[in-house]
Amino acid sequence: MNSIIVGIDVSKETFDAAVLINNKVQTRKFNNNSEGFNKLVTWLKSRGTGHVCMEATGI
């Protein structure tokens, strides 16, 4: 069984996502807003990712 690893770096304007699948890294940058979040979800689902946890920011 191969694991899919996701890393997300959240900042005020954008967030950067990295997905490790079969020892290959894919990266993408998204705007930190509703549209960017929806694009992230679509991108992750298309790669077979089921669960992701992100930090809360702006505290």
Image (cartoon, helix red, strand yellow):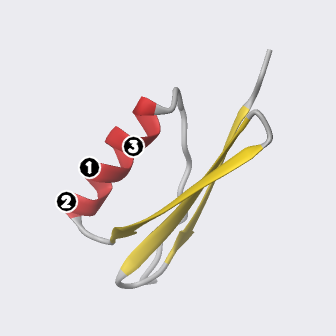
Q: Is residue 35 left or right of residue 31?
A: left
Which residue in the rendered view is the most extreme toward the top? 1
Q: Is residue 58 visible?
A: yes
Compared with 3, 56 (above or below) is below
How packed is label 2: few (under 14 Cα within 10 Å), some, or many (20 or more)? few
SS class, disc 1: helix
The span from disc 2 to disc 3 (Cα, nearest Å) is: 12 Å
Secondary structure under tag 2 reads helix
**Label 3 vs label 1, nearer the camera:** 3
Q: Which amino acid does label 2 sit on?
A: Glu
Q: Is mark 3 on a helix, strand or loop?
A: helix
Residue bearing the label numbered 1: 38
Q: Which amino acid does label 3 sit on?
A: Trp
Circle nearer the N terminus (2, 3)? 2
| Residue beneath disc 2 | 35
The percent position of residue 57, horizontal first and vertical second, equals 46, 76
Tell whether 20 sits left or right of 18.
Answer: right
Residue at x-position 56% and y-position 49%: 53
Q: Residue at x 76, y 33 (%)?
A: 22
Residue, disc 3 = 43
Question: Mark 1 and mark 2: span between their CA atoms?
Answer: 5 Å
Residue at 50%, 32% in the rendered image: 47
Residue type, mark 1 in image: Asn
Residue 40 x/y as whole percent: 37, 51
